[in-house]
Image: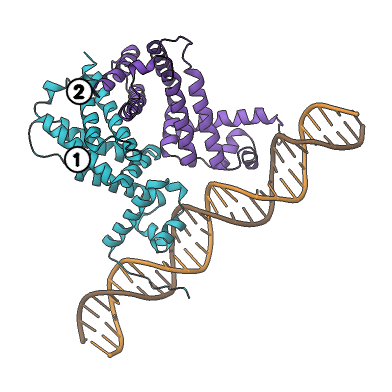
Chain colours: A purple, B cyan, C orange, D brown
DNA sequence: ACATTCTATTGACGAAAATTCAATAGCGCC
DNA sequence: GGCGCTATTGAATTTTCGTCAATAGAATGT
């Protein structure tokens, strides 16, 4: 009766499959609301296999978060232009589009990061730092952004502003267009930095 | 050997003790990283008592979050003045001081809210909304803040900016003074709103 | 000083979820 | 068609959550 035909994949394939399942499942709920039982059943595999690949439930969560972070970074790669302003604009638009296209996944990433343990938070912080560096560590930015503690604080806060605003907009776009949204978050940075003078 | 002298408190005292322990513990780690076993051991009581007072682990978490939210709202009550600008300024300064004085509790609130379930997030959202309403639902604000979808979005994002910036500052104040911090978050609001024109 | 009552508190129990590990069975290779 | 490698399994173990009848502080009355 029980159609127990085990399918044997390469480690890469299986890992991939499980990570994608994780991304899909975590979109709706948190990881600790899903038992390994349900997870493995959903994947059509045994409980033990998840431990074989990820060591623990926590390990699985971390791998999924890492995967989501990598996705985000890869898909918001700015163009090769030198002009920092152009790069910033392109990167932000790409970011907005990514969140729109990937709303649930992105939201669960942010949630997992905020509510997770030290490791998970570090993964998220690294991704965030990588994105910031990518656009700001460009020849010419020092003219726009003096590197002071206050500026760093404001840029950091601006990132939080962008994240929250874009997510809130996805929840309820109410007559604000995608382009208006992009303009809001883009204009916000110079406006915030200007208050420091 | 086992010094089993059970101490009997009034329900209010015990509840208070457990809530305070929760605030302290959740500042560093998430609730689901701490077993009821460890929690009760830390409190010097039996496992059963937590269930007696809070019904479930989740119930305990919700109670702790509610407690943190109530604290926040109570301790940042703005003065009775009518001038919205004055109220905003006073409220923000109170907020900054509250977070500084109450770093652990506040951070556990933010974390729990981000990583928690629907109920916990609702508690947090309510607290946030109450604070915003308290300072903005005042006769005279409409002159300063037009009530448009874009404005709402920006104000909401500004709150995220404030939360993140103040917490980041607490983590690493690096030569930015408390007053400078207060100025940064206060100036940010008009600067952000001005970009909408 | 003692007994009684009330209820805060306990600890043992059962259920569910997490984790381990020796045994099993696909799949490529000779 | 048999052999070896290793991906995969499922049962056993451990940990944690949640329940409940029994226990023991503290106050009150005699």
Same chain for the residues under marks 2 and 1 in the image: yes
The residue under the point 62% across, 41% down is A51
Q: Which residue is mark 2?
A: B190
Along the line of sight, the residue nearer the viewer: A73 or B175 = B175
- Whether residue B174 is visible: yes
The residue under the point 60% across, 33% down is A43
**Label for residue A80?**
none
Along the line of sight, the residue nearer the viewer: D19 or C9 = C9
- Whether residue B119 is visible: no
Q: Is residue B10 above or below residue A90?
A: below
Q: Is residue C26 left or right of residue A189?
A: right
Q: Is residue B10 above or below residue A116?
A: below
Identify the image quadrant of the C terminus of chain A.
top left
* Residue closest to the far left: B82
Identify the image quadrant of the N terminus of chain A.
top right
Q: Is residue B87 above or below residue B190?
A: below
Residue B92 occupies which quadrant of the picture?
A: top left
In the image, residue B134 lies at what x, y percent?
16, 35
Tell me which label, 2 or 1, sits earlier in the chain: 1
In the image, residue A12 lies at what x, y percent?
66, 28
Q: Which residue is mark 1?
A: B94
Count residues near mark 2 (Cα–Cα under 10 Å), then give few for <14, some for 14-19, many for 20+: some
Q: Secondary structure at mark 2?
A: helix
Q: Chain of mark 2?
A: B
Residue A155 occupies which quadrant of the picture?
A: top left
Q: Chain of mark 1?
A: B
Q: Secondary structure at mark 1?
A: helix
In the image, residue A99 lies at what x, y percent?
42, 21
In the image, residue B163 lies at what x, y percent?
30, 34
Q: Is residue A12 left or right of residue A22?
A: right
Instruction: Give the distance between the C-alpha atoms of the residues marked 2 and 1, in whole angstroms.
Output: 19 Å
């Amino acid at each position: 009766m029980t159609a127990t035909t085990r399918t044997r994949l390469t480690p890469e394939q299986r890992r991939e499959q499980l990570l994608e399942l994780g991304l899909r499942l975590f979109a709706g709920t948190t990881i600790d609301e899903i038992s390994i039982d349900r997870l493995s059943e959903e994947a059509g595999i045994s409980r033990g296999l998840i431990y074989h690949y990820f060591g623990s439930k926590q390990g699985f969560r971390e791998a999924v978060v890492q995967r989501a972070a990598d996705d985000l970074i890869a898909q918001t790669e700015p163009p090769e232009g030198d002009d920092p302003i152009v790069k910033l604009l392109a990167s932000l638009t790409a970011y907005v589009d990514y969140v729109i296209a990937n709303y649930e996944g992105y939201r669960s990433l942010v949630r997992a990061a905020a509510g997770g343990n030290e490791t998970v938070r570090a993964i998220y912080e690294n991704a965030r730092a990588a994105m910031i560096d990518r656009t700001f560590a460009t020849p010419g930015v020092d003219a726009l952004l003096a590197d002071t503690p206050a500026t760093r604080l404001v840029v950091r806060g601006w990132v939080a502003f962008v994240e929250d605003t874009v997510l809130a907009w996805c929840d309820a776009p109410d007559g604000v267009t995608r382009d208006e949204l992009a303009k809001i978050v883009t204009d916000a940075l110079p406006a915030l930095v200007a208050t420091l003078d």
